[in-house]
Amino acid sequence: MSESKSVAEVKKALGNEIAELLSIFEKDGNVCLKPRQFLGSELFIRIAQKINDLGGSYANGLFTIPQKQEDSKSGLTPLEELHRMVLDFRRYMEVETEKILKKIGDLKK
């Protein structure tokens, strides 16, 4: 059995407060969520956990949730899930740090 997710269902699951911080759209069979601003570490972790609970992940500045999912989880243990979340957060921080350093470099010119 599978479950299908729509943009409206994802917004409802996240809540209005969090949904307003993200651009949410459908692309290639996924619901994609892109932060509109720098989220900060605590908020990012909170959002990443909710996305993870919905069966999604974070990569390259974008949260993605497959629209069609199997009922079973990804088969990862809780420790493996936590490790994946930490790696997702690390990638996010690297990308955001690179953007900030680029902006600083542009200001020095």
Image (cartoon, rainbow, N blue to C red):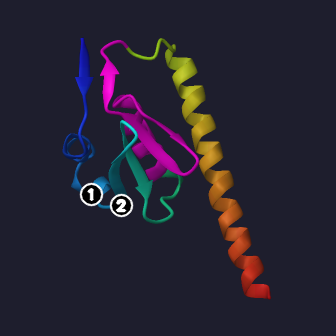
How would you rate the neighbour count of disc 2 (Cα within 10 Å): few for under 14, some for 14-19, many for 20 or more? some
Q: Are marks 1 and 2 in contact (CB under 8 Å)?
A: yes
Which residues are the magenta region?
43-72
- Where, quadrant-wise, is the C terminus in this rendering? bottom right
Q: Residue 64 sits in which quadrant?
A: top left
| Residue 93 screen position, x and y as percent | 63, 52
Q: Amino acid at mark 2?
A: Leu
Q: Which mark is residue 21?
A: 2
Farthest front residue in view:
28
User: Could you say whether the residue bearing mark 1 is in a helix, strand or loop?
Assistant: helix
Q: Where is residue 105 shown, x and y percent of the image?
A: 77, 78
Q: Report the residue at 51% width, 41% height from top.
A: 58
- 72 left or right, relative to 2: right
- Location of mark 1 (residue): 17
Q: Is residue 77 above or below residue 42?
A: above
Q: Residues within 10 Å of mark 1 (few under 14, many from 20)?
A: few
Q: Is residue 103 left or right of residue 54?
A: right
